[in-house]
Structure formats: structure tokens, C-alpha cells
Image (cartoon, rainbow, N blue to C red):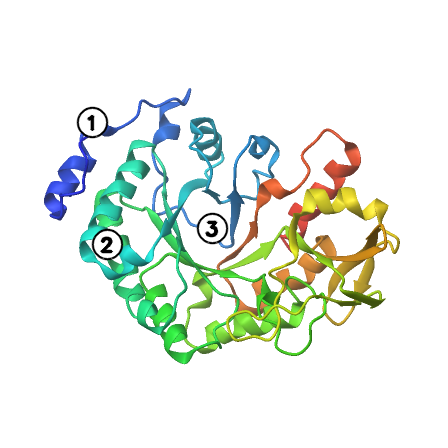
Amino acid sequence: MCTSVAGLLSLAVLALWVTSSSCIERCRCLEPLFCRPLSARRRYAVELFAFHGRGYDWRRYSWTKITTIVASGAYDPELLCHAHAFNARVVTEEIIGMGELLENRLLSTWIGTTLHKIQSRHLDGVHLRFGTVINAEISAKVPSLIKEIKTKFTQIIPGSQVSFFVPWNCNTSTTICSNLVSASKYADYVHVTSFDVQKHMWTDCFAKANAPYHQTLTGISSYIKKGLNSKKIILTLPWFGYDYTCKRFIEAGRCEIVNVPFEGAPCSNIRAHKIAYNDIMKLLPKSISGRIWDDDLKAPFFVYKVGTTFHEVWYDDPESISWKTTFLKKFKLGGIGMWKANFANYSSDPIAAMKNEEMWNALCPP
């Protein structure tokens, strides 16, 4: 049984505790080499991050393309062995809250606990998701936080990878943006979440694309213009969409939704239902419109009815993803990722298998 690290604030004591052999789980890989974190020297020209939730669909992922798995579900030692066999890193996704951001004592405890988890499970690093709204005050703490996490992780686990999420654009606040860009200097990668653009609707209250082409372009450009090194940017695209209930259906592409203000915006998609790509493909054949392509937003959608109520589903598919992956070369980005890989259909159905292959191939432009 490993000792709690709540009171261990000294890095020297922390290092001794983390490296204690009693805290390391037994290697469950058939090849013991696969329990070693990947070397820092192993780098790829273009990274492909696969975000993974729960389940065992990872066995059917496109492993010749993946460079890092970001695991947010329960620890799966078999996944670790499989990923390392393909020279792909496995990092844990961890939420860091306002307490850790504001209190050094809580941050020290969080670092110790997270380091223990990573080292004992033979993982390769951590991906951070902020569990609080990043306002100007909070954002001021982020650079020192990322610096401390990266420094201590590297001292204990040489070559460990540290990355974090940022919003889809860098134009919401000059102060917040500047702080996030400053924090990026200490991280290996910064994941620009190029989706949920309609959380804030500033013009009208109609169903729209989750990751419109031009907004995605603008968002990536905004970070680079503010000084974020493009080779650290991971363009993270959605493998999910939104099912909107139409308050008033005028025509396809003109689905008026309930007006729900959100964080200053007069309307938002927060009442829409998030739907995985797998479920979208099952629903599409039941639509009354078939797949419709919006050439302005560079995104597909369709319409279906439940009784007398119209629904409009906006999503991403291989064609819309291919449009956005052109940004990899255009901006010389560090890589690309999807949220989440397990949102696709990995059944034995041959049509589903073909569509999955198209989704994976769309992430890797020639």
C-alpha cells in the first residue's frame, strides 16, 4: 500500500516517494519493454492524437496512424501494451480545478497524486482539461502552473508529455489569450478544441455546424498571430455533432431553435443533444432529407421528424474533416486529433468499417 502524498511538498521527498518500487504496478505486458515510457527522442513529423473514453473499441483503431492515445476512462493495461507495441504514447486525461489553480498546497498534492498514477501505470504523460471557466484571474495562474507541472514531471519521468486544451479561438479576451500563449511555452502540445463553436451564437438563433470551416480557420490563425508556436498546436476535431430540436422549421438549413442566452451571447446550442458519429450514421437513413452539404460552412446536415417536430442534425464526416485537415500543411501544425475515437462504429458491419476507414484517412491528408 503506497503512502498518501497530501503532505509531501518537497520535490526531493516527492521524487523518493514516486520512485519507490512498492508503488509501481507489475508489468502486465508480454514484452516487458512495452512497460517503459517512450523516449523523449521519439518524435513524429505530424502527431495524431486519439482521445479515448471507455470500452474496448481501441482494438480496431488505426494504429499505424496514432502517435498518442489520450485515455479518459478506466485504466486499461492491455491498451498500454498495445499502444507501446506500435510506438504510440498513452497519456492520462486529468481535470485540474480552480483549487489547484489558486492554491499551491492543492497543486502540490495534485502533482504528487498524478505523478504516482502515471509512473505506477507506466504511462507517458498527462493531458490537462481545466474544470473551471478560464477568466482573466484564473488565466494569470496558468503559465506558472504548466511550467511547474512540466518541470516536475520531467524530473521524475524523463520525456513525459504534457499538453492542455484551449478554446477554439484566441479572440475572446486579449488577457486570457496572452496568458494561454505564455503557458504554451512550457507544454509539449496545445490542443485547440475546434468544435462547439455554437456555444455562443451572436447573430441569429438557428441550428448550425459544430465546427464550421471558416471559424476553424480563424481560430487556428488567431493563436498563431498571438505568438503560439504552430508546431505545438494540435487541431482537435469532433467525431460528434448536435441534434437540434426546431422551434420553427422554415426549410432545410433554417431550423430556428429555442433562444437560450449563454455567457453574454444572445443564443446558444446548449439545449441541443450531442450525438456521436456512430449514432449519426444510424439516424441518417431515417431522415426525410438525406445528407445535405452546406458549401458555406463546409459541413453536412440532415433533417428528420419525430411526430410533428422537426430535428436538424449537424455533424462532421470525412468530407468536412478533409477540408479542415488542409490547415496542417497551411500552418505547419504539430498534429491533429479527434474527440473521440470511440465515437465511431467498430462493429463487424462492412459499411460501418468502410466509413470508419474513411474517417481515419481524412485525418491524414496526403
Alpha-carbon span between mark 2 and mark 1? 22 Å
Please name the residue that numbered disc 3 is placed on.
44
Label 1, secondary structure: give it.
helix
Q: Please tell me whether mark 3 sits on a helix, a strand or a loop.
A: loop
219 with respect to 363 (left or right): left
Reply above or below: 113 against 325. above
| Mark seen at residue 37 | none
The furthest residue to the right:
288
Say what amino acid the circle numbered 2 marks.
Thr
For numbered disc 2, what is the local secondary structure? helix
Q: Nearer the viewer, residue 33 or 338?
A: 338
Relative to 37, 345 lies left or right: right
- Name the residue beneath numbered marker 1: 21
Q: Position of residue 144 (x, y in %)?
A: 25, 64
Q: Position of residue 329 (x, y in %)?
A: 58, 64
| Residue pointed to by mark 2 | 151
Q: Residue at x 86, y 53 (%)?
A: 290
